[in-house]
Amino acid sequence: MISEIISNLELSEIRDAVEANKRLDGRKNDEFRDIKIETGVIAKAEGSAVVTMGKSKVIAGVKISVGTPFNDRPNEGVLMVNAELSPMAHNTFEAGRPGEVAVELARVVDRSIREAGVMDTKKLCIEAGEAVWIVNIDFYPLNADGNLFDAGTLAAMAALKTAKMPTYDKETKILNRENMKNAVPMDCTVVASTFAKIGDKMVVDPTMHEEYASVARLTVGIRDGNIVALQKGGNGGLTSEQIDDALTRAIKHSKNLLKHIK
Amino acid sequence: MGDEKPKFLIKGGKRLDGRKPEDVRPIQIKMGVVPNADGSAEVIFGKTRVIATVYGPRELHPRHQVINERARVRVRYDMMTFSVEDRKRPGPGRRETEISKVLAEALTRVVITEKYPTRAIDVFVTVVQADASTRVAGLNAASLALADAGIPMRDLVVSLSFGKSYDEKGQGHMVVDLEKEEDNWGMGDIAYAVAPALGEVLLLQMDGDVTLEEFKKGKTMADKAALEIYEMQKRALKARYEEGSK
C-alpha cells in the first residue's frame, strides 16, 4: 500500500488550495501538469518512451517475442501490460513481488488499452494454434509523484506507436530483431484522465501528496470521445454528480492528451 | 460452450434469459451459512453464487499493517477452481488481487473502523459458482456478513453490474445485472456499488465502450435496481435477527 505520513498542516494546505481552485503548484483543479514525451529512448526495446508529467516520470518499453497462443484463442496473439513499482522511484516502494497497488496500476492501464481495441490481437497471429506474437509492454516509474495511471497509459501508447515488429521465420523458427521496419498493428489510441477527490472537488492529474490528501480516485479511459475503462479507487465514496463531472472533463482532456502521442 | 458469439443479446426488448433490460436475475440471500465465522452470508444472482465470511475484529498480523487510528478491513476475493468453465488455478491471481483491493476500499467506507483501532476485520469472499457479476454479488454478501458479525456500519453496500448489450440490429442497449453471455459478448461491463443512505458510489469499474449518455442512463437504471437489492438485504438481516431471538 502506498502511504506516507504527511503533516496535517500540509493536508489542510492542500485542501484549502483545492477549495480556492489554486493548487500548491499553481494549477487549477482542472489542469494537467506539463507533459513531455520522448520516444525511442531504449535501443534494445522494440519500442520505448519516457513520459514526464511534472515530477512524475515513467519509462515504458515494448518487447515482442513469439510464443504459443492460449488454447481458447488459437488465432490470437497476446498483449500484456505490466507495471513495476521499483524501490528506485519512491521511498514507499518496496522490493519484491508486485503488491496490490502495482497490480491495480498495471491492470487499469491494460484495461484502457485492451478495451479501446488499440490492438487487434488477431493481427498478431503467425500460424493458428502454433505461433503468435506476444507483445509485452512494461512500465516503470523513474520518479513517482502521483498519477502514474495517466503517465503509464501515455508511456505505453507512445512506446507502442513507435514500436517495430521483429521478423520470424516459420521454417527455422528464428526470431530476427535486425532491421525492424514494420510498425506494430494498431487500430486506435486511448488516453486516460485520473481525478482525485479532495474535499468535494474532483482534481485532475493529482500529485502524490494530493493523492494522500484525497479520499477517492477515479481513472477514466477515453477513445474517440467514448468511455472505455473506469476504475474507482480509495476508501471514500463519490457522488453521482462527481462521477458525471469527472467523465465530462475526461472526454474534454482526452483531446489534449491525444496531441502528445500523435 | 459460450465460444460462439450470439447473433443478439436482446431481441424484441427481451434478453437471452427472458429478462427486460432493467431486471435483475432472481436473487437469493442466505444468512449465517458458515457457523464458524463471526458473520456470513451467501448471495445468489441467477447462477452466480458467492459466500462471504467475516472474522474479526481480531488481532492484525503482520504487525506492520496495523493502523493505529482505526481497524483495517482486509478482503480476500477468490474463486473456487470448479466455479468456472475451465478449471481456475487455485489461489488469487492478479485479477483477484485487484478485485480484493477495490472491495476492501468499498467496505472500508461503511465500516465504522474508528471503533477498533489497530484491529483487523477480515472478509473472505469466495465464488462458488460463476456466471458473471461475481465481484458485485460478493460485495453484497460481504456487506451482509459484516452486519451479521455485528460490526457497526454507516450503511449497507449494495452492488450490481450494468452494461451494454446489442440487439438483432447491432444496436446497443443498457442493461443491469449481466449474466455470462452478456459479460462475454456485450459492449460494456460495469461493476457498481452504492451506499444508498450515504448517497455515494463505492465501487466503479468498467471495461467496454459506452458514450457518456449511455453511461448515465445505465447508472440511473442501476440506482433503481440497487434500491430493490437494498430492501432485500434489510429484509434478510431482519429475518436473521428474528430467528436469533427465538
Image (spheres, rainbow, N blue to C red):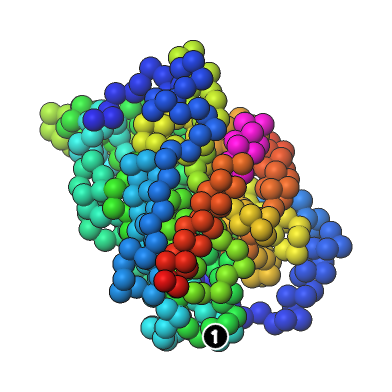
Q: From what the image shows, is residue B239 above or below residue A257?
A: below
Numbered-mark total:
1
Type of the residue with mark 1: Pro
Tell which of B137 and A199 is nearer to you.
B137
For disc 1, the chain is B
Instruction: Name the outermost residue toward the top.
Output: B169
Q: Residue at x 53, y 23 (%)?
A: B172
Q: Is residue A11 visible?
A: yes
Predominant SS of the magenta segment: helix
x%, y% of residue A224? 61, 30
Q: Residues within 10 Å of mark 1 (few under 14, many from 20)?
A: some
Horizontal relation, residue A153 to residue B244: left or right: right
**Image coordinates for residue A245, horizontal then vertical, percent:** 73, 45
Compare residues B74 and B240 and report the one nearer the observer.
Answer: B240
Residue A134 picture quarter: top left
**Picture residue at 73% right of the left edge, 55% below the top:** A202
User: Is residue B72 shown in magenta?
Assistant: no
Q: Quadrant of the C terminus of chain B?
A: bottom left
In what element is the residue under mark 1?
loop
- Report the residue at 56% width, 51% height from top: B231
Q: Is residue A68 left or right of residue B7?
A: left
Q: Is residue A188 above or below residue B39?
A: above
Furthest residue toward front? B246
Residue at (43, 51) in percent of width and height: B137
Quarter holding residue A29? bottom right
Residue B3 versus residue B47 in the image, above or below: above
Task: Report the residue marked by disc 1.
Answer: B117
Residue span colored magenta? B213-223
On the picture, is A53 further left or further right than A102?
A: right
